[in-house]
Amino acid sequence: MIQENLKAILVTIPSDVTLVAVTKTKPVSDLEEVYKAGQRIFGENKVQEMVDKYDQLPKDIQWHLIGHLQTNKVKFIAPFVTMIHSVDSLKLLNEINKEAKKNNRNIDCLLQFHIAEEETKFGLSLEEAKEILETREFVEMQNVSIVGIMGMASFTTNQEIVRHEFRTLESYFQVLKSHFFKFNHEFKEISMGMSGDYLLAIEEGSTMVRVGSSIFGAR
């Protein structure tokens, strides 16, 4: 069933959009199912869960940390994480850079923006993101690459609200691209859209969708 779900979703996603299979709370046996079907990019919310699963699964999997990340947890994933979607402070970026250097790695990161109506969601404002990118600290970082941005839409059935939030995020991407990354071809990812709204997100410019329950079933 999981493999059928995955195939059904892949048919709806254009070839230039990346599917991150969100594996949080799912047992390793479920992850092995999607792995057998060819999926290699997995997204986890919690550091400990990611580390445990990394230890048990094949090493060609690309692990994306998509949940809120505390600075004191960076060291546990720095040796292997492929991308961190949830960078929401200069302090966190500094820590990622430091731990990446210790592991002789360069870690791809996305700046997380607050686009939803809910206050509980994490993320930067456009001004805060600009402030980070203008700091000397950021400019001198050698072991992180900002490759794009991420955002989570409001949890609502109102498609117009969601569409507006996705458009806002896409506009932030264009501002940062023109101001800070004009000649940087690596800055190209817009991570937005989940099981309930990924098709809408793709319409609005998403390059990376994070889908869990539509593949694995509801939690």
Image (tube, rainbow, N blue to C red):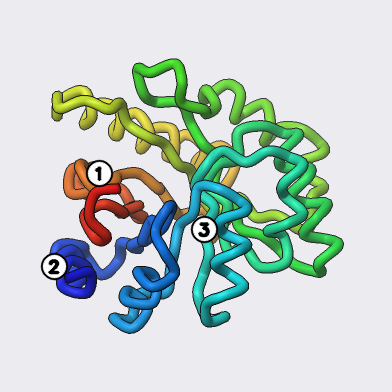
Q: Is residue 216 left or right of residue 122?
A: left
The residue tagged 1 is 201
Cα–Cα span, label 3 and label 2? 22 Å
Q: Which of 28/82 is in front?
A: 28
Tell which tag, 1 or 3, sits nearer the viewer.
3
Q: Is residue 67 above or below residue 122?
A: below
Tell which tag, 2 or 1, sits nearer the viewer.
2
Is disc 1 in contact with disc 3, using a CB cutoff of under 8 Å?
Answer: no
Q: Say what amino acid the circle numbered 2 marks.
A: Ala
In primary-sequence order, the first of circles 3 and 2 is: 2
Which residue does the image show at 75% across and 67% down from the upper left?
Answer: 105
Which residue does the image show at 29% across and 46% down from the upper left?
Answer: 194
Q: Is residue 155 left or right of residue 45?
A: left
Q: Judging from the image, what secondary structure is the residue with disc 2 in?
A: helix
In primary-sequence order, the first of circles 2 and 1 is: 2
Q: Say what amino acid the circle numbered 1 marks.
A: Ala
The residue tagged 3 is 64
Q: Is residue 129 visible?
A: yes
Cα–Cα span, label 2 and label 1? 17 Å
In primary-sequence order, the first of circles 1 and 3 is: 3
Local crowd at mark 3 within 10 Å, few (<14), some, or many (≥20)?
Answer: many
Which residue does the image show at 73% across and 66% down from the upper left?
Answer: 79
Local crowd at mark 1 within 10 Å, few (<14), some, or many (≥20)?
Answer: many
Q: Say what amino acid the circle numbered 3 marks.
A: His
Return the mark for residue 81.
none
Q: Is residue 18 above or below residue 167?
A: below
Residue 47: x, y in percent?
A: 61, 51
The residue tagged 2 is 8
Residue 197: x, y in percent?
A: 21, 42
Residue 67: x, y in percent?
A: 51, 43
